[in-house]
Amino acid sequence: MTFMTWLILPCCAALVLAYRPFLDPLPLHSGWMWLMLPLALAIAVVYKTIKLPDLSALPRQAATLAVQIIVFMALAAAAVWLIVELA
Amino acid sequence: MHAAHQIEGRWNIAAAVAGWAVPGLGHYLLGQRRRGGILLVTIGLLWLGGLLLGGISVIDHREHPAWFLGQMLMAPSVLVDSFHQHLRDHAGVPMPHSSAFEPSFGHVNEQGTLYTALAGLLNLLAVLDVLYREADDTRELEPQAKGRSG
């Protein structure tokens, strides 16, 4: 390990120790758009859990619905972006 | 004669209240244990994820009453809100300077609020599903049920 790593490690440890789960927010200020993926997956799983008569098909059906949600949200975002850019 | 052919549904008010208190508990009480378990894990993780992201400040009926309408569709959100308000009222100093908890801002707060509100709205779907059941609901027979594909 380099000198800088040895210097940074105690600081990181101190930050982790200072963090109190559920009382302090997570420092996720970049990449927050990726949080859409578990959101879409949860919607798909709950919807299909309620609707399907046979839960053996749940993984495949929920995955399909989650992909559909993500694709259509991406298409809607692209369409809105185009409207904003062209207008 | 006509009445004999009528399909009567049934109301499950106690199961619906249980489902509001703990996601999936309503389904569990109606005998759909696997379905209830999946709902508990999915909705529970979504709600806990939101709280982990933004901290307890994402559930706040004073600052975000409209979001709280969605969040309160899951009973644990009401408890977290009362705990949050208790910490805020007894902090002694104005909130941003208190060490009781750290309020979240920006995208982290938005995502945490969205996760917890969506967990509440998904729980509403689950509660409505158990509240009224048609007599010929095929989902009662989970292993044998066939045909319907949601």
Image: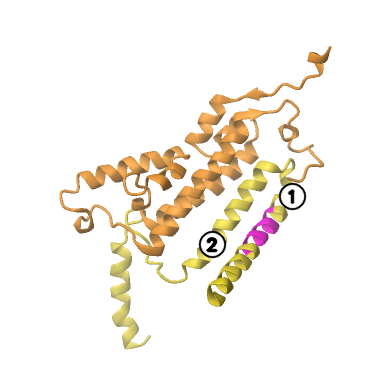
The amino acid on which the numbered mark 1 sits, given as a three-letter code, is Ala
Tell me the residue at 76%/28% (across/down). B136
Image: B88 above or below A6: above
Q: Quadrant of the C terminus of chain B?
A: top right
In the rendered image of this protein, which colour is used for chain A?
A: yellow
Is B123 left or right of B75, judged from the image as shown? right
Residue B30 appears in the rendering: no
Q: Quadrant of the N terminus of chain B?
A: top right
Q: Which chain is orange?
A: B
- Is A67 one of the magenta-colored residues? yes
Tell me the residue at 28%/43% (across/down). B85
Residue B27 in the image, given as x and y percentages of width and height: 61, 34
Is A84 left or right of A12, judged from the image as shown? right
The residue beneath circle 1 is: A57
Magenta region:
A62-70
Tell me the residue at 60%/39% (across/down). B36
